[in-house]
Image (tube, rainbow, N blue to C red):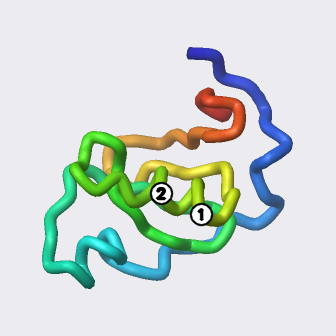
Amino acid sequence: MSVYPCSHVPNVIVPPTSAGCEECLAMGDEWVHLRLCVHCGHVGCCDSSKNRHASRHYASTGHAVIASLERDEDWMWCFAHNSQVG
C-alpha cells in the first residue's frame, strides 16, 4: 500500500455529521468501524461491515477520500486511487 499526497483531499476537512453510521442508525443496524467522508462529513460503516455504507457513499457521490473515525487510527484512504493518503 503506497502512501502519497492526493489531489482528492479537500483543503478543509468537514467534521462528522453523526456519532455513528448514518444509514445503519436509520435502519437500526450495526457496524464494525466508522469512516468519515472528509468532503461532506458523512459517517459511514467500513467495508468489513455488512452494509459498506462508506463505499456506497463514494459510489453515489464521487467523494473520494475517507478518514478513519476509530480512536486509535489516524489515516485517510482515496477510493479513486485505491490507496492510503499520506
- Residue 81 appears left or right of 51: right
The image shows residue 43, relative to residue 46, as above or below, that is below
Mark 2 residue type: Arg
- Give the image quarter of residue 28: bottom left
Q: Mark 2 points at which residue?
A: 56
Q: State how far apart marks 1 and 2 are (Cα).
A: 6 Å
Q: Is residue 11 left or right of residue 39?
A: right
Residue at position x 61%, y 30% in the image: 82
SS of the residue under disc 2: helix
Q: In this view, does 82 lie above or below 39?
A: above
Give 35 or 53, whichever is nearer the viewer. Answer: 53
- Image quadrant occupied by the C terminus: top right
Taking depth in this image into account, of 57 and 5 the one nearest to the observer is: 57
Q: Return the residue found at the far front.
A: 60
Amino acid residing under circle 1: Ser
Q: Is 23 placed above or below 86 here?
A: below
User: Few, some or many C-alpha atoms within 10 Å of disc 1 (few <14, some 14-19, many ≥20)?
Assistant: few
In x, y percent, where is residue 32?
20, 50
**Nearer the observer, 63 or 34:** 63
Element class at badge 1? helix
**Residue 34 % position (x, y):** 34, 57
- Toward which corner of the image does residue 1 lie, by quadrant? top right
Which residue is located at x 27 percent, y 41 percent? 48
Residue bearing mark 1:
60
Q: Residues within 10 Å of mark 2 (few under 14, many from 20)?
A: some
Q: Position of residue 13 (x, y in %)?
A: 68, 64
**Which disc, if any, is residue 37?**
none
The vertical placement of 24 against 37, above or below, is: below
| Residue located at (79% from left, 37% from top) | 6
